[in-house]
Image (cartoon, rainbow, N blue to C red):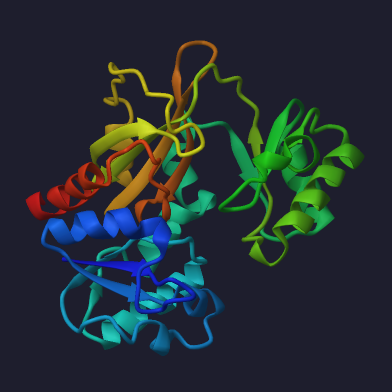
């Protein structure tokens, strides 16, 4: 098993400092580690050069910054040309990475959602009317702008078409070239807990911890995931995260799903524990 991480932009032979602790833990666990040029992967202009230092042969897990689904698919193609099999295929990455792909499987346990396929107002209005009235959280297929909550994420009343479009326009402006797919409108639910990040390998939960935004808010020790396990299994994905929050009525809900390769590890989780959980589950499988 090989771990691929982004290189340091200023020292391209060395891993990006953000992933240095995971790299050390991976090497201590006996994994081969290689660097890739994330910037070149994200641009898509020289993917061959981006993977030039990856040894040929074997299976690889990527741990790095987010990539668009098309860019990730191209990344896996170039690895294949070097005889390297990406454990997560391009199609699997998209299914974990983009909400419209995972939502149908998890619709019963996540806020009611609708989405557009463009950034046009007419398309947005159709989605808005389909959702109905009430409070809504807005995002694109992969990301919200929750740090701009009042201006680019939260819509107090989706029936107020001009106010809703103002929020959508601001989201589109802030996401700029990173805007993916279309608008996603999610029914607002009141949560009473910090988010909990759960990590899954081949449909089995291997690690439960805090969300990176609240790394020292330890999750309850008695979280029962029996309701979620068959649903994550039904996704059929090798490595994913599911972020959970406790709703005001005491029910755990799925807030987000993501590809585990590009989901950040909270600093409070020991990197050796993380690598052991990730790789141990892979080897056991």
Name the residue located 81 percent from the left edge and 28 percent from the top edge.
157
Question: Which image quadrant is residue 122 in?
Answer: bottom right
Residue 9 falls left or right of residue 282: right
- Quadrant, the N terminus: bottom left
Residue 237 in view: no
Q: Is residue 128 above or below residue 1?
A: above
Q: Is residue 112 above or below residue 199?
A: above
Name the residue located 44 percent from the left edge and 84 percent from the top edge.
47
Q: Is residue 129 above or below residue 61?
A: above
Taking the view exactly as shown, the residue that stands out farthest to the left is: 284
Taking the view exactly as shown, the residue that stands out farthest to the front is: 11
Residue 206 in view: yes
Name the residue located 42 percent from the left edge and 50 percent from the top edge.
263
Which of 218/136 is in front? 218
Q: Where residue 9 sits in the image (x, y, percent)?
A: 48, 74
Count of marks placed on residues: 0
Q: Where residue 89 sits in the image (x, y, percent)?
A: 33, 67
Q: Where residue 25 sits in the image (x, y, percent)?
A: 21, 54
Name the residue located 27 percent from the left edge and 41 percent from the top edge.
270
Q: Where residue 205 sits in the image (x, y, percent)?
A: 25, 37
Taking the view exactly as shown, the residue that stands out farthest to the right is: 162
Which of 208/23 is in front? 23
Residue 279 falls left or right of residue 113: left
């Amino acid at each position: 098993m090989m771990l691929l991480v982004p290189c340091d932009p200023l020292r391209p032979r060395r891993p990006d400092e953000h992933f240095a602790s995971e790299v050390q833990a991976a090497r201590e666990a006996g994994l081969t580690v290689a660097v890739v040029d994330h910037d070149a992967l994200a641009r898509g202009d020289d993917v061959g050069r981006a993977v030039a230092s990856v040894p040929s042969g074997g299976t690889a897990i990527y741990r790095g910054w987010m990539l668009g689904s098309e860019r990730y698919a191209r990344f896996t193609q170039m690895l294949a040309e070097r005889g390297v099999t990406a454990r997560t295929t391009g199609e699997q990455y998209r299914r974990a990475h983009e909400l419209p792909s995972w939502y149908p499987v998890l619709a019963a346990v996540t806020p009611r959602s609708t989405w557009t396929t463009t950034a046009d107002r007419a398309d947005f209005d159709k989605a808005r009317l389909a959702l109905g009235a009430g409070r809504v959280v807005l995002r694109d297929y992969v990301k919200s702008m929750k740090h701009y909550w009042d201006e680019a994420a939260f819509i107090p009343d989706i029936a107020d078409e001009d106010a809703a479009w103002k929020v959508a326009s601001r989201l589109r402006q802030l996401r700029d070239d990173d805007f993916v797919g279309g608008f996603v409108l999610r029914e607002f639910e009141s949560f009473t807990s910090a988010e909990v990040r759960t990590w899954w390998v081949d449909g089995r939960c291997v690690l439960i911890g805090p969300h990176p935004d609240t790394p020292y808010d330890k999750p309850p020790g008695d979280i029962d995931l029996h309701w979620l396990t068959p649903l994550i299994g039904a996704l059929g994905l090798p490595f994913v995260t599911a972020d959970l929050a406790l709703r005001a009525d005491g029910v755990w809900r799925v807030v987000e799903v993501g590809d585990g390769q590009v989901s950040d590890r909270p600093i409070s989780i020991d990197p050796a524990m993380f690598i052991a959980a990730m790789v141990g589950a892979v080897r056991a499988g």
